[in-house]
Amino acid sequence: MAEATRKSSAAAWLVRGFGILVLLLGVPLLVGGGWLIGLGGSAYYLLAGAGLVVSGWLLFRLRPMGAWIYTGVFIATFAWALWEVGLNGWALVPRLVAPTVILFGVVLCLPVLLARRGWQMAGLGAAVLTFGVAAFGVAVAQANRPMSPAATSGLPLTNADGETTGADWPAYGGTHGAQRFSGLTQITRANVSQLERAWTFRTGDLPEEKWGAETTPLKVGDTVYLCSARNILIALDARTGRQRWRYDPEVSDDWIPYTAACRGVAYHETPTTGQGQPAAGGVVRTTAETATTTGPARTPGQSAGTEATPCAARIIEGTLDGRLIAVDAATGRPCADFGDNGSVDIKTGMGGVIPGMVSMTSAPTIVRGVIVTGHQVLDGQYRSAPSGVIKGFDVITGELRWAWDMTRPDITALPPEGQTYTRGTPNMWTTATGDDELGLVYLPMGNSAADYYSGDRADLENAYSTALVALDVATGRPAWSFQTVHKDVWDYDLGSQASLIDYPSAQGSTPAVLLPSKQGDIYILDRRTGRPLTPVQERPVPQGGVEPSERSRTQPFSLFHTLAKPRLRERDMWGMSPIDQMICRIGFRQAAYDGPYTPPTSDRRWIQYPGYNGGSDWGGVAIEPRKGWIIANYNDMPNFNRLVPRAEADRKKWFPHGDPRAVSGGAEGAGDPQVGVPYAIDVNAGWRMATTGMLCKQPPYGGIRAIDIRSGRTVWDRPFGTARKNGPFGIPSMLPVDIGTPNNGGAAVSAGGLIFIAAATDDLIRAIDIETGETVWQDVLPAGGQANPILYEQDGRQYLVIMAGGHHFMETPRGDYVIAYALPEAG
């Protein structure tokens, strides 16, 4: 009897402890729920909190009524959740998972609360609850399947740049038209499951911080060319991945801007009699490692039976310290006829440049023998930042052909002595697209320095910022421009490389350029004139903010297609529990938000949706020309921003880059001083919760979509990226569930019916069936795959190659891996 009494007493105290837990969970819901109601939000949290407090108190006193009250709260919660979000699985997580766990606890308390009948009631309750949860899970899974493929026109496109990508991948975008399409068919839906690693190469370049190589290799002849995170140029045997040569331009770490990234290089082949010799200013290492072949391998720039002319074929890259480097494609030795022993400093004429403020992270573009260069200017530091001047250099000599300083059209080369190019003007940090036929180069332009304040910008800055500008490569003068955001104060600079297509219509095809944007809109323009070929509508947008007289009353919206989702609502807030979700709902109600283009504010946070990471970013889109489809991966996250008055920023000791007191690291925009304008900027990128580190908006956070070019309709759309490397407090959940993660990098499409892409934060590379959007193969990468893959063929074998370098901002593991996949060799 004593033993039974002791056990009974111990069980009773467990129930009392559980009651205290329920009560404590109810208190913040009760208090926060009242706060939320005061802000005009949902009344659920106050009512649920009150129910939990009462239930918890009664459970502590061992009253059965506590169990019945909680059961009532759960039933009401279930009904409210279905009313608010339906069978949206991710939206139901914070609404139902924690309450269901508590309900299981209540069921386990029944034996103590109901004495003799308790075990039977507990067993029955557990069985009913388990069956209900399982049935509900099945219903949610069915409701959250990817969108089924839609009927499409299937109208093929011609290859706009007159090239095809097959055995080689000679340009950053596959071809100079940047369609990222390969005509190779060896790897198909039927055999892709057999893909295996053919070779792995490590660059040896692993920055301790700010990592993010983002490299897209090239393949020409039997050689793969690439650059490492800090601009080491490397040539590999395309069959084996063995190094042929490497050239180190010796970039100092103090020139690393926000990220140590080299997205790619350019290849150019021209007959020349120049005598390339080893040059100073770098270190070249050449190895004789080559695979045995059945015949002599052709080196780029060398015809059969002839000796190679030095630098007849050359690799050109832009460096983090603002130099153009040209080396011999066959040997890696600098081209002595190019600039100063193979190097040209693009910073000439910019005046004083603090290390790290000017860098070239994207592949150069070559049109009609002219290398067109833009460069990154570090965001958020100074209004008087270095100029965004665009320059054209002779591809053989490195001589400056022209310069385009948008506010000083009278400057056509170097500025007059004692002057500099106009400081603070919009720059082009991403990759341009060349059009040899028309002699134009299409520049996706960024924003003026001090991205989030526009009060002192010149008229020509306002005209060319966040616009696609077509320059005549013979003169460097604008042929036309098309602006996607007027007076941009949202950091919506154009990050994606534009793609050349021939746009189909009833009257025939029109030479066109397809332009994705960070705000999600996709535009199709006549590439001869910049005239939209699909409707663009100027719509009224919210007004006000800190510069009400500066805000454009309308913004251009593409009626062809947008990757942007409907505007956020309070019910779209998320978390791992009702408490997290309530906190995010309070933040939503406190913030300024009136849909797209909500003006920046300083008295409270404002919501920017999509955030500055897109929509589409530097990975761009891929084109399947035979089907006439766009393949676009995209981000779907808000930013939670605030303009910070100068005096407050000074008190917070937000110092600009170059000040010895400045602290590096953190997300872009998180405490950027914007010296020279009245406000600093504080960006909560993705709108992370301070408690768990999870995002406040409900999943998915990224997706991938197929779009019919002729109609602009979505063919299929699905979340992109699993939850395996994501979780609260930065702890990987390892759940193979398609949550849809943030992603950086793009896709390559093959004629074998497959999309190859990494990009997501789950460290996977995938093959996706282009017809259905379903993943048909995947492999775990040793580091983050924030890069674009390439496809090529060598000796009859098709290869898929990806750089796995990771990314500090995306919080994926750092690495220096170049990995090639192929089908098993016969025999």
Image (spheres, rainbow, N blue to C red):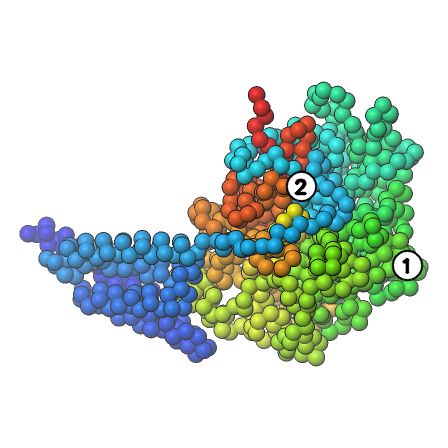
Image: 8 above or below 384: above
Q: Badge 2: few (under 14), some or many (20 or more) residues near its Cα, within 10 Å?
A: many
| Position of residue 44 measured from the top left corner of the image (x, y, whole percent) | 37, 72
Query: Is there any visible trace of residue 385 in the rendered image?
Result: no
Please state which amino acid type lies under the numbered disc 2: Ser
| Lateral position of residue 536 relative to residue 809, left or right | right
User: In this rendering, does residue 572 appear at all?
Assistant: yes
Front position in the image: 691 or 716: 716
Q: Which residue is rendered at x = 63% and y = 78% of the image?
A: 544
Quarter of the figure with residue 518: bottom right
- Label 1: few (<14), some (14–19) or many (≥20) C-alpha neighbours in 10 Å: some
Q: Residue at horizontal 84%, vertical 61%?
A: 478
The amino acid type, in three-letter code, at marker 1 is Thr
What is the x, y in percent for residue 719?
Answer: 51, 53
Q: Nearer the viewer, residue 700 or 263?
A: 700
Report x, y in % for residue 642: 60, 69
- Circle 1 is placed at which residue position? 412
Residue 525 in which image quadrant:
bottom right
Q: Is mark 1 on a helix, strand or loop?
A: loop
Q: Mark 2 points at which residue?
A: 182
Residue 683 vs 459, above or below: the answer is above
Q: Which comes sooner in the sequence, label 2 or label 1?
A: 2
Please indicate whether residue 737 sits to the left or right of residue 749 in the image: left
Front-most of residues 320 and 743: 743
Answer with the quarter of the image where residue 125 lies.
bottom left
Q: Which residue is drawn at 78% across and 54% down?
A: 374
Q: Horizontal placement of 95 versus 278: left or right?
A: left
- Tell me the CA gap for discs 2 and 1: 39 Å
Viewport quadrant of the C terminus: top right
Residue 234 image offset from top left, x and y in percent: 72, 35
